[in-house]
Image (spheres, grey):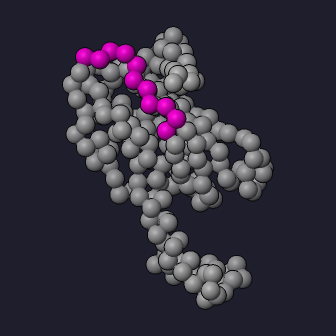
Amino acid sequence: MIERLVRDLLKEIGEDPDREGLVKTPERVERMFAFLTSGYGKQVDDVLNKAVFQDNYDEIVVVKDIDFFSLCEHHLLPFFGKCHVGYLPDGKIVGLSKLVRLVEMYSRRLQVQERLTSQIANALLEALRPRGVAVVMEAQHLCMMMRGVEKQNSKAVTSSMHGIFRERIESRNEFMQLIRSHAT
């Protein structure tokens, strides 16, 4: 179905879908969209995959600089950047790679950055019931770089703070300091 739509789109913009360079483009675009929207076929429980464990660890857990790529739901153009995820456990921890997979699952849907940030935070809140969750995303949006305002150096930054990270400025500041640090 997508393959046929892409052929029609190529014709509409004045291209010949049967010319050598475009013959396989509809098939490639269909596979690309299947990959870039594969997050719709996954649920939080599938992603966490029983990797939530009882533990008494009581300090902030942070995975920072998680690369992500998503598609803007308004223009179907990519936006991409870094995601920083932190939480303060309350008896449960999760495998660190699962935080990365959670970001990946939600980013592989048509999105706006604001919702993406909230979805990641809310999923962690529900799954772990921690004392707090903090998510910060920094992204460049091709819809702002290639069209519209055409600003190549702009970044959008969004955050979603819950629990102790919303209530206590000291905890929020500690999280922000951790994601800014460059420890080796």
Question: Which one is in front, 78 or 19?
Answer: 19
Which residue is found at the position 71% from the left and 50% from the top?
144
Observer-nearest of 82 and 169: 82
151 horizontally vs 131: left or right:
right
Q: Is residue 57 magenta?
A: yes
Q: Which residues are the magenta region?
A: 56-66
Q: Which residue is drawn at the image coordinates 51% and 15% (left, top)? A: 174
User: Does the magenta-highlighted stretch encompass residue 15?
Assistant: no
Residue 133, position as x, y percentages in the image? 42, 26
The answer to whether residue 115 is seen in the rendering is no
Residue 145 visible in rendering = yes
User: Residue 60 is drawn in which quadrant?
Assistant: top left
Residue 21 location, quadrant = bottom right
Residue 113 x, y percent position in the rendering: 56, 43
Q: Position of residue 122 (x, y in %)?
A: 40, 35
Q: Is residue 160 left or right of residue 47?
A: right
Q: Residue at x 36, y 38 (%)?
A: 97
Indicate the position of residue 45 as horizontal and vertical percent values: 27, 44
- Counting labels gives 0
> Height in image: 176 above or below 125?
above
Residue at the image point whose x is 54% and y is 15% from the top:
173
Q: Is residue 70 above or below residue 31?
A: above
Q: Quadrant of residue 123 in the image?
A: top left
In the image, residue 162 sits, relative to residue 72, either above or below, namely above
